[in-house]
Image: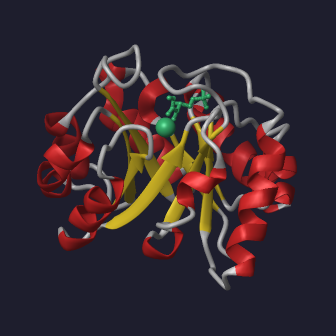
Amino acid sequence: MEYILSPSILSADFARLGEDVKKAADAGAQWIHIDVMDGAFVPNISLGFPVIKSLRKETDKVFDVHLMIEEPGRYIEEFVESGADLITLHAESAKHLHRAIQQVKAAGCKVGVSLNPATPLCALEHILDEIDMVLIMTVNPGYGGQAYIDAMDQKIRNLRKMADERGLDLDIEVDGGVTADNIGHIKECGANIFVAGSAAFNGDIEANVKKLLKAMEE
Ligand SMILES: O=C(CO)[C@@H](O)[C@H](O)COP(=O)(O)O
Ligand SMILES: [Fe+2]
């Protein structure tokens, strides 16, 4: 199983976004996590297509685009054209989730589905075989810097079991409150892709990313 660190630019300095992303990439982060928020699905507004398009010129790293927007199916083409490599949709945000998943695949992009902390795994029952990744939110989406919700440990364990029982080599991404201190424990629960926002971008980005990578690889 491949282990991947995906620093979330939500906690970067938006006035120096290109530089911050390059620092994280040069320090060894495999992916870059891009949080898109619309002020409707979540109570915050972050960034959109022009920012992703501009960042695309700065690095070749995988752009892991986390859509926290209502009815994401309306904008799939634009996100792919902007440079997304992987698009993650929230199960709670799409009336026709199955259709939205097909739209991402038809656009030639990898697809993930995310679940809020209160959404049960059974929401994945009929789509798990269709997708590349599940993103387990370990905070309520909308903001960086929140504490990891411990009850999500069991949810990650149960999802790994569910995937194994179906013979799926599923990527499980965890997003929210990930730090160098808990990343090893989250890995032990069954996750293999780790998003870190404040733990990566607050302070010395290079040192933070190296510390997270070391803790992830231990
Ligand atoms: O999707 C989100 C928040 O909704 C995240 O990707 C955050 O950006 C994670 O930040 P930290 O909890 O790691 O500070
Ligand atoms: Fe995110």
Residue 140 placement, left or right of 1: left
Q: How many marks?
A: 0
Q: Quadrant of the N terminus?
A: bottom right
Position in image of residue 20 (x %, y %): 42, 34
Res. 29 in view: no
Position in image of residue 8 (x %, y %): 49, 37
Which quarter of the picture shows residue 159? bottom right
Q: Which residue is drawn at the image coordinates 19% and 72% (left, top)? A: 106
Q: Which residue is drawn at the image coordinates 44% and 46% (left, top)? A: 91
Position in image of residue 191 (x %, y %): 72, 58
Q: Which residue is drawn at the image coordinates 46% and 54% (left, top)? A: 113
Residue nearest the observer in this picture, 65 or 58: 65
Which quarter of the picture shows residue 157? bottom right
Residue nearest the observer in this picture, 96 or 14: 96
Q: Residue furthest top?
A: 43
Residue nearest the observer in this picture, 117 or 195: 117
Q: Residue furthest bottom?
A: 167
Q: Is residue 84 above or below residue 125?
A: above
Residue 215 placement, left or right of 53: right
Q: Is residue 207 above or below residue 44?
A: below
